[in-house]
Image (spheres, rainbow, N blue to C red):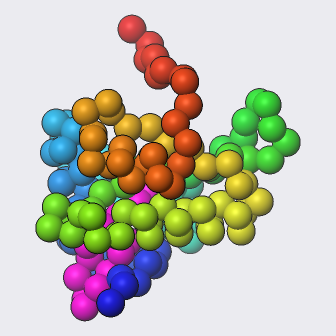
Amino acid sequence: MSPTIRPVRPEDRTRWQDLWTGYLDYYETSLPAEQFELQFARLTAPDPSIHGLVAEQDGELLGLVHFLFHAHGWKARDVCYLQDLYTVPAQRGTGIGRALIKAVYVAADARGAPDVYWLTQTFNTPARQLYDRIGTATPFMVYRRA
């Protein structure tokens, strides 16, 4: 049975935090409690600045995706940045990550922003196997302010 992909709801708070913590742990980072509060408030706002979807099956949340829309200097239409994607380890390889990405594609198309992009770290081999099937790698490297 396929999971239901749906927007994050206020009653998801505890389980959403567990999922996002798992995501942050994978990337060996942590955030203060205030950032969790801010992120969840953004995701559940009536007009969210960051959108969140979860994969739910049999009442359990098995994955999440966060994404946002923004203007692009080279395009007339907004673009969509897929910021966070996470599936619980026991469910990896079952199609949940693919379903979450495809749900972002649907949301982007509905918003008139068909260009969707995301980043991952080079060591994220399992995710990159999926990304290579559902997206196209670009030659760009990411730099940050020193």
Which quadrant of the figure has residue 17? bottom left
Q: Residue furthest right?
A: 76
Q: Is residue 120 above or below residue 99?
A: above
Q: Magenta stretch mostly in which secondary structure?
A: strand
Q: In this orientation, which residue lies closer to the viewer: 23 or 127?
A: 127
- Residue 8 percent across, percent down from the top left: 41, 72
- Percent from the top left, x then y, of residue 33? 21, 49
Q: Is residue 74 left or right of residue 51?
A: right
Instruction: Please tell me which residue is depicted at 27% across the width and 40% down the height of the picture.
Output: 124
Q: Position of residue 133 (x, y in %)?
A: 47, 53
Which quadrant does the C terminus fall into? top left
Q: Nearer the viewer, residue 46 or 19?
A: 19
Q: Who's the residue at 71% across and 68% down the image?
A: 110
Q: Within the image, what quadrant is residue 48 found in?
A: bottom right
| Residue 112 covered by magenta stretch | no
The reply to whether residue 31 is visible in this rendering is no
Q: Which corner quadrant holds the N terminus?
A: bottom left
Residue appearing at x 53%, y 49% in the figure: 135
Give residue 92's position: percent from left, percent from top.
Answer: 24, 63
Q: Which region is colored magenta? A: 54-66
Q: Is residue 55 magenta?
A: yes
Q: Is residue 121 above or below residue 56?
A: above
Residue 68 against residue 75 in the figure, above or below: below
Horizontal side of 71 relative to 81 (left or right) equals: right
Q: Residue furthest top?
A: 146
User: Looking at the image, can residue 22 be seen?
Assistant: yes
Q: How many marks?
A: 0
Q: In the visual, does 4 lie left or right of 62?
A: right
Residue at 71% across / 55% down in the picture? Answer: 114
For residue 85, which quarter of the picture? bottom left
85 left or right of 109 in image: left
Task: Decide which of 68, 34 is in the foreground and name it.
Answer: 68
